[in-house]
Amino acid sequence: MNWQIKPFSHRCSITGEPFEDGARYASYLVQEEGDRELSRFDVGAEEEARFQPPGEVLCRWSREYRKESGRENPAKRQKESAESLFFSLFESEDEEDDRDRETMKQVLGVYLERKRILKDRGFAREGAVQVMEHRKSGNVFLVPTGHMTPESLLRIQEKLGEWIG
């Protein structure tokens, strides 16, 4: 399965102002109230305190904005987006982590392993988690296993329909 995650915006969702090169901003994936659709919001760091999401925030991550050069590689950008989303799923761990979130971790982990961003280091907890190492940083992630079912993949596809093709 090869999924595409939409690229980052070039403008603040609150002010509409373009991001300056080197500026920090946060991206939010929000499931709007009463709707199964997802919306993405990119908000400048200085405006983040004013941001009121119109529904449940499924994940949040931050980045530094870089102006595009004419020679930027779209495949590289897609990998960076998937990598950022994967990291964000581990930033705010809850004790009651829902199964869809665990499935997202597993699917993105497999994708990033295939793209040679993560390296498989085996299994732990009697096969309940796959140990994956980020090749560049050496950070280790415990990716849940066994939660990927056809039903959960359909739910994730619905949740990430705006981002993933």
Image: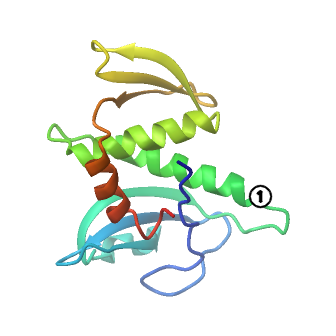
**68 in relation to 144, above or below:** below
Where residue 125 sits, quadrant-wise, is: top left
75, 20: nearer the viewer: 75
**Image coordinates for residue 63, horizontal then vertical, percent:** 54, 57
Where residue 22 sits, quadrant-wise, is: bottom right
21 vs 128, left or right, is right
**Image coordinates for residue 117, horizontal then vertical, percent:** 61, 35
23, 86: nearer the viewer: 86
For residue 91, say whether it is visible: no
Where residue 72 sits, quadrant-wise, is: bottom right
Q: How many marks?
A: 1
**Residue farthest to the bottom, as pictured:** 16
89, 152: nearer the viewer: 152
**76 in relation to 130, above or below:** below
157 vs 78, left or right, is left
Please tell me which residue is depicted at 41% across the width and 75% down the height of the picture: 47
**10 in relation to 157, above or below:** below
**Image coordinates for residue 76, horizontal then vertical, percent:** 70, 52
Q: Secondary structure at mark 1?
A: loop
Please tell me which residue is depicted at 31% across the width and 68% down the height of the picture: 30
Please tell me which residue is depicted at 77% across the width and 58% down the height of the picture: 73
**118 in relation to 7, above or below:** above
Q: Identify the residue position indicated by label 1 in the image.
A: 73
**Residue farthest to the front, as pictured:** 150
